[in-house]
Image: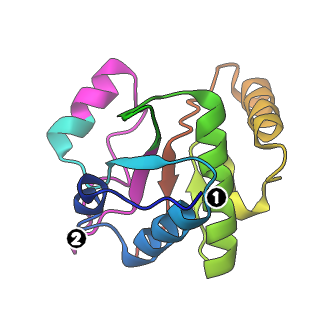
Amino acid sequence: MAYRLGQMSVERLDGVEPRLVRCVRRAIEISDQDFSVFEGLRTLERQKELFARGASRTLDSFHLPDSKSVGHAVDLVPFIGGRVQWQDVPCLVIARAMLFAAKELGLPVTWGGVWEKPLAELDPDDLAGDIDRYVDSFRAHTGRAPLVDRPHFQVPRSP
């Protein structure tokens, strides 16, 4: 089934880096899971709130606008039964679509499920395993658990 972005999702892409927007638009066309753009650009106040709650580990989020007022991150959340739902398996389906879209477009996307490698280098058929290996490696090197943010996708900031 071919999906398309709803009006609210389209509006939430305003101000997001154009190549990332193209990737999201391509991903929705090829995805086996409908999704919504939950957040694109974010205010510093919102970022501080997420940081305080532990939902983010940085105040330097790629969701924040750069010096050119461009954001470099999106959160894509499964749309199931008429509402957004934060379920792990559907998030993996979205990540798979983003992986294929990023490869097709030659775009260096980083995914919040596995922060240490470009999304295109992960195994599209074993993203859950990639997360597990990342978590184990992170714990082994730091002694703590990483933030696994399955809905999050970002591209490098412009110099």
Q: Position of residue 142 (x, y in %)?
A: 69, 26
Say which element carries label 1.
Answer: helix
Residue 99, image quadrant? bottom right
- With respect to residue 50, does 94 lie above or below? below
Residue appearing at x 72%, y 64% in the figure = 120
Q: Dot 2 lies on which element? A: loop
> Is 150 situated above or below 60?
above
Instruction: Determine the CA span between mark 1 and mark 2.
Output: 30 Å
Camera-nearest residue between 100 and 34: 34
Q: Which residue is mark 2?
A: 67
Where residue 91 appears, x then y in whole percent? Answer: 59, 39
Q: Is residue 31 visible?
A: yes
Q: Is 109 in front, or is 3?
A: 3
Say if the magenta span includes residue 14: no
**Image check: 5 left or right of 24?**
left
The region drawn magenta spans: 48-76
Which image quadrant for residue 49? Answer: top left
Question: To which residue does mark 1 refer?
Answer: 97
Provide residue 64's location: percent of width, then percent of height.
Answer: 27, 54
Of the two numbered discs 1 and 2 in the rendering, the one whose residue sits closer to the viewer? 1
Q: Where, quadrant-wise, is the N terminus in this rendering? A: bottom right
Q: Is residue 69 magenta?
A: yes
In the image, what residue type sits under mark 1?
Ala
Q: Residue at the spot x=26%, y=56% of the render?
A: 12
Q: How many marks can you see?
A: 2
Left or right of 129: which side holds 138?
A: left
